[in-house]
Amino acid sequence: MEEIVVISGKGGTGKTTLTASFAVLAGGEAVMVDADVDAANLSLVLTPQQLESHPFIASRRAVLYRERCTECALCRELCRFDAISESYQVDPLSCEGCTVCSRACPEEAIVMAEVVSGHWFLSETPYGKLIHARLEVAEENSGKLVTLLRNRARELAAAEEKKYLLIDGPPGIGCPVIASLSGAARALIVTEPTVAGLHDLQRVLAVCRHFEVPAAVCINRCDLDKDNARAIEAYCNEESVKVAAKIPFYREVTEALVQGKPVVSYTRGPAAGDIVNLWQSISANGC
């Protein structure tokens, strides 16, 4: 089983669009993971039918029992997040779950309660199983959630003897990205021809190298700024990084997304042809 992670240094480069088409091109031989939980949108183009739903608990919040409280104000003095009001009510949005108040309270009037941060799902799509998640309001993605999704997908792919595990990774270089990359067979970094695109490519490539994950690069919308596209390609050549594809801007890609379909399912035009070539490059020859 090959774990292929599609990542980017920033959001909006087109990694989800490519991952959706890769799911189609894998021909039913893949399990998909949407690890970009902060902006989970792979399901928008894979039309999943939910099979399972499970709560995700990643944090704890303080709960204050007024009947035990003597209003000694020790908790209010120690809380650096100002989460406890003058009326001794805990603001769940301000509480960071640090446990200081519960440990300090002489009356044991404060306890730490588990909080459901979101839910993760197993769904069936026309192209295979999809593992994805949805966070509650004001919750954020974490390496713990990404690891949970990957582990469940690995178990499923092994049980069904699938050839690929396709991961739509989160953008940036933070903890969720590290959880997406660690142990993967290869990564595809999707970038765009801007100054920020080159800078973010350099950062995420450094993360891939730190975890010894071979990486290739796709320059998406490469015709929007040809000078920056050449600069990115020159950088990749200097760093001995394979440029697996240079895909121009295609209006048919936007049309496919409006229809809620993967590009290669919507059209057989040049956009689909470029994506097919990219998939053949990274799936057959590696990085």
Image (spheres, rainbow, N blue to C red):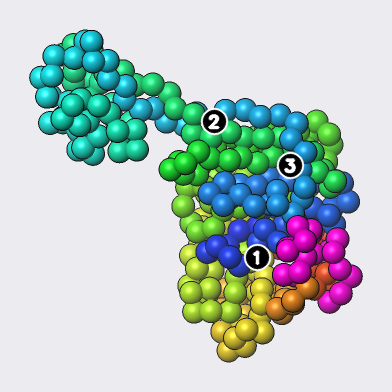
Q: Which kind of residue does numbered mark 3 sit on?
A: Leu
> Looking at the image, can residue 45 be seen?
yes
Q: Is residue 52 left or right of residue 277?
A: left
Q: Which kind of residue does numbered mark 2 sit on?
A: Phe
Q: Which kind of residue does numbered mark 1 sit on?
A: Gly
* Residue assigned mark 2: 56
Membership of 261 in magenta stretch: yes
* Residue assigned mark 1: 14
Dot 1: what SS?
loop
Compute the Cα span from label 3 to label 2: 17 Å
Dot 2: what SS?
strand
Q: Nearer the viewer, residue 260 or 110?
A: 260
Determine whether label 1 and label 3 are within 8 Å by CB. Answer: no
Magenta region:
253-270
Residue lying farthest bottom?
Answer: 227
Instruction: Name which of mark 1 and mark 2 comes first in the sequence.
Output: 1
For the point 56% across and 52% down, the residue is 39
For the point 61% across and 67% down, the residue is 13
Image quadrant in which you'd find residue 78 = top left
Counting other residues with Cα less than 10 Å from the Cα at mark 1, is it few (<14), some (14-19), or many (20 or more)?
some
Q: Which image quarter holds the C terminus?
A: bottom right
